[in-house]
Image (spheres, rainbow, N blue to C red):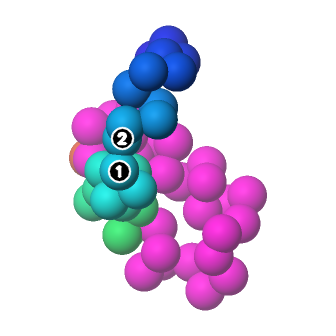
Amino acid sequence: MKYNPITAKTSTPLKLKDACYRKAKAKYRVFPSAYASGYIAKCRKRKGNIG
């Protein structure tokens, strides 16, 4: 995904809080953390299919 300054300014914070964000927040007690960030990245790469 390429960084676009025009869409970055207009995007809302709620778009970033997708299903992967909620799964990571529920799974990890300390949030945000490097483990949770890695989990979110892996989840988004696999389109939400993570076990």
Question: What span is colored magenta in the figure?
Answer: 24-48
- The kind of residue on which mark 1 rests is Thr
Residues marked 1 and 2 touching at CB (< 8 Å): yes
Q: Relative to 45, is 38 above or below?
A: below
Give coordinates of residue 33: x percent, y percent: 71, 66
Residue nearest the observer in this picture, 33 or 49: 33
Dividing the picture into quadrants, the one containing residue 6 is top left
Q: For the residue carrying disc 2, how many other residues have a C-alpha within 10 Å: few (<14), some (14-19), or many (20+)?
A: few
Q: Which residue is mark 1?
A: 12
Residue at x-position 46% and y-position 67% = 24
Q: Relative to 12, is 23 above or below?
A: below
In this orientation, does residue 51 appear?
A: no
Q: Which residue is mark 2?
A: 11
Rendered-image quadrant of the N terminus: top left
- The kind of residue on which mark 2 rests is Ser
Rendered-image quadrant of the C terminus: bottom left
- Structural distance between the alpha carbons of marks 1 and 2: 4 Å
In this orientation, does residue 36 appear?
A: yes
Q: Main secondary structure of the magenta part?
A: helix
Q: For the residue carrying disc 1, how many other residues have a C-alpha within 10 Å: few (<14), some (14-19), or many (20+)?
A: few
The magenta stretch spans residue 32: yes
